[in-house]
Image (cartoon, rainbow, N blue to C red):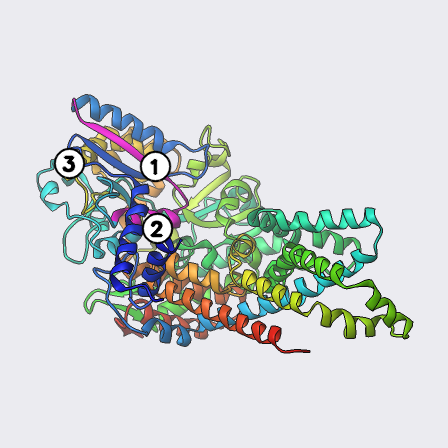
Amino acid sequence: MVLFLAGPIAYCAYIAFTDLQLTGQAESSFVGFDNFTAAFRDDAFLNAVRLTLVFTFLSSIVGQNTLGLALAALMQRASKPVRTVTGAVVVTAWVLPEVVAGFLLYAFFRREGTLNAILDWLHLPSQNWLFTLPILAVSFANVWRGTAFSMLVYSAALSEIPKEVTESAEVDGANSWQRLWHITLPMIRRSIGTNLMLNTLQTLSVFGLIWVMTRGGPGNRSQTLPLFMYEQAFQKSMIGYGTAVALLLLVVGSLFSLVYMRLLRTEA
Amino acid sequence: MRPTAPLLVATALLAAGTLTACGGDSGSDSNTIKVSFKQSTDNQIKVMDTYLAAMKKQFEKANPGKKVELVPIKAPDSEYYTKLQQMLRSPKTAPDLVYEDTFLINSDITSGYLRPLDTYLDKWSDWDQFIDTAKTAAKAQDGKTYGVPDGTDTRGLWYDKAILATAGIATPWQPKTWDEVLDAARAIKKKVPGVTPLNVYSGKPNGEAATMQGFEMLLYGTEGADSADPLYDKSSNKWIAGSKAFKDSLEFVETVFKEKLGPDVSDALDPNLATSVRGELLPEGKLGINLDGSWLPQDWLKGSGHEWPEWSDKLGLAHMPTQHGQAPGKVSMSGGWTWAIPAKSANPDLAFDFVKTMQTKANAQRWYIANSGIAVRKDVAADPAYVKAQPGIKFFTDLVASTHYRPAYPAYPKVSTAIQEAMESVTTGDASVDEAASTYDEQLKTAADGKVVSKP
């Protein structure tokens, strides 16, 4: 493993410090931290960082996580047929290839798409979602596609909670909110941390879904870091700069991981 | 445990070895040439495959013992460039002959990917048949020529005769100024509901089409653009920032979308707009005026999937006027593709022999007609059989005399992206013309590595 990975990884790290281009230059040279300083001066890069944070926060931390927990909690109480159907639907969305899911949601959101047809039918104003609110549309798409993972993690976690504990709380007169807050959440704290970490790292690197739906547009209103990276490296041929941005994305990912690690360690 | 440097180097080499091994060896067999070309992503379209197969047959018959191996790359334009550049980087994977877009050729020349062809061209009598503008399409800043053009294209206004008639505009229509184009669009908007009055490609999703079919068709028609390039100052070898011509062109784009004369903004920024213009909007009579290229009919020929034999009755052609009708009165941009020989080719001499076979008068003519291309050979352009082969050929071939080539220097692809971004921000209304122009000036400094000069 190390043998196959170390070489390319080392080479990538090296490229990030050069001004290598795919075309348009006679030879590349070592430029130190220029790519990184250029990135922080580049409005388009800062915009991509902002959008990546918005996308990750909305679709992973808020969307997939809470919805996954809610679904898991509901399924605990639901009858078997309901459980089976819900589980099948949610998991189907998750196992679909990214590109297929992207096209499905493109068809759902586009101006002549399903969502607007439903809104028209309800006599609500329809609009072109992919154009007016692209980052929300792709965030929703990511929630739709990725919730299953959180649901499975939380289902497993909830089934681990011993019945006696919740029952005795009920006898002591705790209502369902209090039970959730004081018993359930603390008991599945580790699962929450693990789930958040995996979710976040996955969401940070989503490319295909956004590419199919909006290509990062209109303008660059849904251009998250992976799309920005692709544009710089392969559409503008600036391989060095693109690779530097990739390393910065890695840094963003590790920052999130660090925060979650701390959360996991502190005792509630 | 930190891996030591020698180990790292060894693994890197190993990895590189395994990676390139997948590419296969070009095998420096002196009797075979490998020819790379862009295969259409549409499985129905085999124009180039068919033509090259015929050329291969001819060549192998005339040169016993020599072989041509065709290496198609099936990809959209932008990905084709990337793939090709990666192949050109190593002698192991470099083909002997490549199909290069004039849009990128200078960029690839600077990278040292291609070899100059002057020694071959000097000994090739047919080269004199090529028109001068086409010869310069693949001429680099070092004065050497790196590619043989296999045709070119021009651009103009396609209009729907029925829609113009309903709007009360007499046909054949020929606007003399930008304002007349806009006035016609305004008349259509007022009197013909349910159609798009005027299409001008704009924004990043449309890529080079926005820059060339849209913006440059305007920019090169501004005052003084005919004598001096409005994008690139040849005397100082610098890119031009802050010009009035640039803002005027942006203003035209802004007007089109502000007054809702163009497609709905979200459609205008849909990467599939060009496909729907050719496949749906024009054939279904839903588009009044379209600023577009000479190649459109290739989609409407027999067996093309969108057969539309009536197009020449339904549509009219007008050349794009200059801004205020100043001389020469019309504007066109031209691009096109060339055959080039990679620097790392193992068989350059044989590769050029194959170019000569493809570019005989008869073979060149056959190719121009097959792909709705515009002739770059004088003898073909004058041949009645070519002129009559398709409606529209004469109109677009005549434009070659007053066409402009892009300043396709190495920085051009990045400059082009900056132009698309400026267009996009006035299209969406996110920025005013002045704001968009000053953003462009900023981006230009990066794209051109500081080689920028301000012109009023």
In the depicted view, which residue is nearer to us: B208 or B376? B208
In the depicted view, which residue is nearer to us: B320 or B444? B444
Q: Disc 3 vs disc 2: Cβ atoms closer than 8 Å?
A: no
Check disc 2: other Cα within 10 Å, few if <14, some if 14-19, many if 20+: some
Residue at 25%, 53% in the rendered image: B108
Which residue type does callout 3 highlight?
Answer: Asp
| Distance of label 1 from label 2 (alpha carbons) | 14 Å
Q: Which of the numbered marks, if any, corresponds to residue A121?
A: none
Q: Quadrant of the N terminus of chain B?
A: bottom left
Q: Disc 3 vs disc 1: Cβ atoms closer than 8 Å?
A: no
Q: Which of the numbered marks, if any, corresponds to residue B82?
A: 2
In the depicted view, which residue is nearer to us: A196 or B278? A196
User: Which picture quadrant has residue B226?
Assistant: bottom left
Q: Quadrant of the C terminus of chain B?
A: bottom left
In the depicted view, which residue is nearer to us: A154 or B64? A154
Residue B329: image x %, image y %?
A: 34, 55
Residue B203: image x %, image y %?
A: 46, 60
Chain name for mark 2: B
Pointer 1 residue: B72
Which residue type does callout 2 highlight?
Answer: Thr
Is B250 placed above or below B314 here? below
Report the side of A243 relative to B203 (left or right): left
Is B76 inside the magenta-drawn segment? yes
Q: Which residues are drawn in magenta?
A: B64-88
